[in-house]
Amino acid sequence: MTYLVTGGAGFIGSHLCETLLQRGERVIAFDNFNDYYSPERKRRNVAGLLDHPNFVLWEGDLRDPASLLALFEQHRPSYVAHLAGMANPRYSLQYPALYSAVNVEGSVNVWQAAIQYGIQAFVQASTSSVYGLAPTPWHEELATDRPLSPYAATKKASELLAYTFHYQTQIPTRVVRFFTVYGPKGRPDMTPTIFVEAMRKQEPIVLYNGGVDVYRDWTYVDDIVSGVIAVLDSDRAFDIFNLGNSTPVMLRSFIDTLQAITGLNAIIEAKPLSSADPPITFADTTKAQQLLGWKPTTDIEDGLERYWHWYKTEYDC
C-alpha cells in the first residue's frame, strides 16, 4: 500500500515514515521545510530514508492545493496520515492567522485531494490541547469546545472538518489526540531541548509555577507512532482516540529526572503559568486499549535516556 504522511520530515512524521517503510509499505512524505525551526534539522530527519526504494520526499505546502493534487495524481496514495501543521500553543497567540491558514485551510486542501482520488482511509492528527481546562483524566467523550489558544482551536476545527468530510464521503476516518510527545528528533522549541540547552549553558529555566502543581502526560514518540499505526490499521468508520502515557509527571520531577540522566544542573526561574496552557494533561486511553489493543510501553526514565543519547549525537556533545 502507499501511505501519504503530511509533515513527513517533522518530529513524529519522520518516525512514522521509518516505521511504515520497515514493514514494507510505500511512503510519500510531504513537507514544506518551513523556517519555524531549522529546515536542515528536518532534512536530517529523513536523510537516511532518501535512498530507500519505497520512499518519496515531496516538497510542498498545505496551502498550495495544486501541489497536493499533483502528488495524488502521480503517486495515488491509499492512506493518508495528516500530521502536518503549525504547533505550539503559545506561539499561536502571536500568529493566529497563520495557524488558521495552515491547520484549517491546509487540512481542507488535503481532504479535497484525498476525496478526489478516492483514498481508503484518513487519519487526522490532533492534540490534547483541545480539552482546555476540562477535569482530568481526559476521555474522548468530554466536551472540547473551550480551547485556550488559537492552536487548540484550529486543531479542534480540523477534527470537526474530518468528521464532516467522513460523513459526506464515508471515507473511514480516525482522529488521534497526541499528549506531550517527546523523544529523538524532537523540535528545538519543545520542552526537553529547551531545558537541556539552558542546563548546558547554565542559564535559567523558566518553570511555570516553579514546576510545582504543573503536570504533563509525557508520551514517548515510539508509543505515539505505534498508536498511529494501530489507528491506520483499524476498521473504525469514524472515531477519536487519545494517545498518551496516562501517567502525568510534575514538571519539577521531570527536571529532576533530566538532571539525573544528563548530569547537568538546572537553574530554576519561576513564572506564572501561561494562559494558553492547562495545569495538567492526563490521557484516559481506555478506548485505545479496548478498541485498538494499544498501550504505551515507555516510561519517562527510559524515554529521556533515549532522548539524551540522540541529543548528544545531534548536538555533538
Image (cartoon, rainbow, N blue to C red):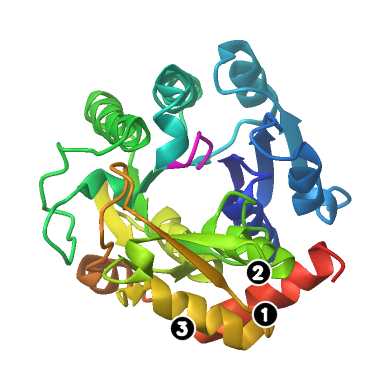
What residue appears at the point 68 percent right and 24 percent down from the top-left corner?
60
Q: What number is the disc on residue 264?
A: 1
Foreground residue, 60 or 117?
Answer: 60
**Disc with the residue nearer the chain's start (2 vs 1):** 2
Give the amino acid at mark 3: Asp
Residue 290 picture location, percent across and down = 23, 73
Residue 290 position (above or below residue 231): below
What is the secondary structure assignment of the residue under circle 3?
A: loop
Q: Is residue 204 left or right of residue 165?
A: right
Tell me the distance, in whole angstroms, between the alpha carbons under discs 2 and 1.
6 Å
For the point 56% across and 85% down, the residue is 302
Looking at the rendered structure, the secondary structure element under dot 1 is loop
Mark 2 near mark 1, Cβ–Cβ under 8 Å?
yes
Q: Quadrant of residue 289?
A: bottom left
Give the residue at mark 3: 299
Q: Position of residue 6 (x, y in %)?
A: 58, 37
Q: Position of residue 98 (x, y in %)?
A: 48, 20
Q: Please report the bounds of the magenta region as a residue range.
A: 83-88
Quick check: 175 above or below 280? above
Q: If you read the primary sequence from the N terminus, does the residue marked by circle 3 or circle 2 appear first?
A: 2
Q: Which mark is residue 199?
A: 2
Left or right of 253 in this view: 135: left
